[in-house]
Amino acid sequence: MRILVADDEPSSRLIARVAVQTLGHECETVSDGAEAWEAFRSRPHDVVISDWLMPGLTGLELCRNIRAHSAPGYPYFIMVTGQGARDQVVEGMTAGADDYLV
């Protein structure tokens, strides 16, 4: 499985990469939403794990772009963030996130 991790925190990217690779999956990491969008458009991923608050595109904007993009298959989108208020969770899920981790 090909997994894209987008997070502006280097330590979070490293932890995610190690976890994903330990599970036997291919992992690509990027440091902002714009890089994530370019990476996804150049080679779609099976799963996208994204922080909400990032430079470039936010995780919310990234999710909306991916859902509007006609890529083969269905990429599972996981939003990982500290934005845990009820209205923010609803906003993330409405944007197309499949899972939301606070």
Image (spheres, helix red, strand yellow):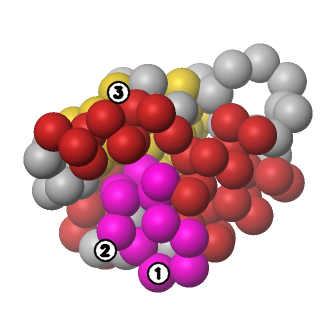
Nearest the viewer among 22 and 67 is: 67
Q: Residues within 10 Å of mark 1 (few under 14, many from 20)?
A: some
Nearest the viewer among 38 and 95 is: 95
Q: Amino acid at mark 2?
A: Pro
Q: Quadrant of residue 19?
A: top left
Q: Earlier in the sequence, mark 1 or mark 3?
A: 1
Spatial CA distance of label 2 from label 1 is: 13 Å
Residue at position x 68%, y 43% in the image: 66
Labels 2, 1: front one: 1
Query: Mark 2 falls on what kind of element?
Result: helix
Report the span colored magenta.
Answer: 50-60
Q: Quadrant of residue 98?
A: top left
Mark 3 — residue? 99
Query: Mark 1 falls on what kind of element?
Result: loop
Spatial CA distance of label 1 from label 3 is: 22 Å
Residues at badges 3 and 2 in contact (C-beta under 8 Å)? no
Q: Position of residue 84 (x, y in %)?
A: 14, 47
Spatial CA distance of label 3 from label 2 is: 22 Å
Q: Amino acid at mark 1?
A: Pro
* In this picture, residue 72 sits left or right of residue 97: right
Mark 1 — residue? 55
96 is higher (above) or lower (below) than 37? above
Mark 2 — residue? 10
